[in-house]
Image (tube, rainbow, N blue to C red):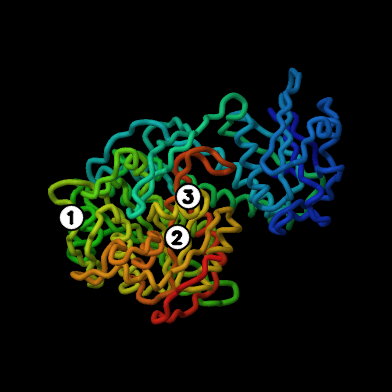
Amino acid sequence: MVTLRPGGPAAPDSSALAVVVLSSEETASDGQGGSGEAGTAGSATVRDGYQVSPIAGAACAELGINLDALLTTHTFGGDAGSVLLVPLARAEPPARLLLVGAGTGSGADWRSAGAALARRAGAGDRVALVADPDSAALAAFTEGLALASYRQPRGAGKAASDVTAASADAEVGDLSAGQTDLQGDERVTDAVDAADASRETDEVSPAEEPAVPVTGPERGHGVDEVIVWTSRALTPTELAEAAEAVRRAGVLARAVLTARDLVNMPSLVKSPEWLAARAVAAARAAGLDASLMDVRELEARGFGGLVAVGAASVRPPYLVELRYDGPPTADGAELGHRVLVGKGITFDSGGLSLKPAGSMAGMKTDMSGAAAVLATMVALPELGAPGRVTGLLCIAENMIGAAAMRPGDVITCWGGRTVEVLNTDAEGRLVLADGLAYAAGALGADLLVDLATLTGAISVALGRRTAGLFASDDALADGLTAAAAEAGERVWRLPLVEEYRPALESPVADLANIGRALDVGGGSITAALFLREFTDGLPWAHLDIAGTARADSDDAEITRGGTGWGVRTLLRWLTTAAAPTAVDSSVPAAVPAS
């Protein structure tokens, strides 16, 4: 999708010419962006209030456009993600000129520029882009372009009747390449709005917000190719670095799109066995080891959370285990065994603690955590991530029926800890409890990270663009926070308040699945405290992505529907992670929220 052409004029057969404009007042004199993480590689031409490539003026002049006059007339300052579209009265290509703002030249701004170009360029366009990005900026631009070009699968599909049929279908798609064999080849941006769920449940539906579809030239998914023309020739080393940056950005973007496809698949098709079969097929295609446990094995091995949550569904639960063993780190540091655990509720009715109808509409996305873990795992080989990583997908469907888990039931999770179920709509923590305990007790994990669309309270606290981070280890929290910032996925660390732990006490079990013993509120905190009980004192982090896993409208690289949130953060963290540190399980992990 992105090709680099150094030291030459724009391609004459391009359907559109785009010029990147940076805000010169905020751009550092060395050409680096405000964050220092990305910037420009060439010696840019600086004007009053903006900065462009030295060849931009000449490229526009060939089209009869005075670039300086155009920028001045329209007071276009190059704000990140801004676009000025100029139709050209020409019989031959290019037929349009686009001025694309890249702000201060930070990685986030280049990502916004790529996303803006994807939305404003025409479908099937071949765009000549005049800019001088360095390798980091080029990677960020590529990410934004690919992610904003995503369109949801469209088509009713058909239900998977059994595991065998699902497994056969799974061979067709290549999740490791960001492609899924979804029914219907049309893609649109579409999602379902729903009302807020109860704050005490494991899930929140998107708040009802008006989503205004963009029409006309503002739409434009499906840019065919972007050819980046730089003002100077690059050395072989610089060319190799740029090509590798684009390649890695493409791998990362395809992983996110894989997660989005899985999240957006209707639950009619996306049964637990469908998702489990595709996960195994995708992992093996990517070169990972993969295995799954069906309901009989889950029952025999004591996975009481998964079995109880999936008991009412005619489509039984599964646990999928994906294993990756990467090369050693360059400095020989021992990273330990890192285990990712994803919540994979393929549809959440709330069980007998039934959700309101409006809150149920978006619950096909309640497996976003498992989708993120799967997409992350299949991308690791292509990125050459160091060390040993295991992914666990805890997959079930939470339905109603004669066999349903009841409020007041006491279940036994993996490892023997008992839980009194006070709310069947707080089911995600039950399947995660099995996964975390199994990872800590049977897999020899050194470090645990879980992702889950867990609580409605997290959206109330942080909104729809920031995920909640809870952690028992400061170094792990810092690493994930840094990775999220670099990836453009914002997190905010929240405290594990030890004084709230008594709220989970139960008179008939080791703990209750919601905090009602004391009226402390803080649903996201008590949910995290519940999960901590199953980590065996290991360094552990919990990402509550109930707000960020889905979006009601397009925004920069985010597209309406499932967002694939967490894939970019996990991949950056796993490719740059430091060795884990020990944690004293006897000391409460209470961390200030600032």
State the SS at label 3: loop
Residue 13 is situated, as x and y percent measured from the top left of the image, at: 71, 28
For label 1, the residue is 406
| 73 and 563: which is toward the camera | 73
Mark 3 neighbour density, 10 Å: few (under 14) some (14–19) many (20 or more) = many
State the SS at label 2: strand
Q: Is residue 593 left or right of residue 15?
A: left
For the N terminus, which image quadrant? top right
Residue 543 - label = 2
Q: Is residue 262 left or right of residue 554?
A: left
| Residue 216 visible in the snapshot | yes
Residue at the spot x=23%, y=41% of the render? 161
- Quadrant in the picture for residue 223: top right
| 184 and 47: which is toward the camera | 47
- What distance separates the C-alpha of mark 3 from that of mark 1? 30 Å
Mark 1 neighbour density, 10 Å: few (under 14) some (14–19) many (20 or more) = some
- What distance separates the C-alpha of mark 3 from that of mark 2? 10 Å
| 561 and 408: which is toward the camera | 408
Q: Amino acid at mark 1?
A: Arg
Residue 322 is situated, as x and y percent measured from the top left of the image, at: 37, 60
Residue at the left extreme of this rendering: 402
Q: Amino acid at mark 2?
A: Leu
For label 3, the residue is 548
| 113 and 376: which is toward the camera | 113
- Quadrant in the picture for residue 448: bottom left
- Give yes or no for contact between labels 3 and 1 (Cβ–Cβ under 8 Å): no
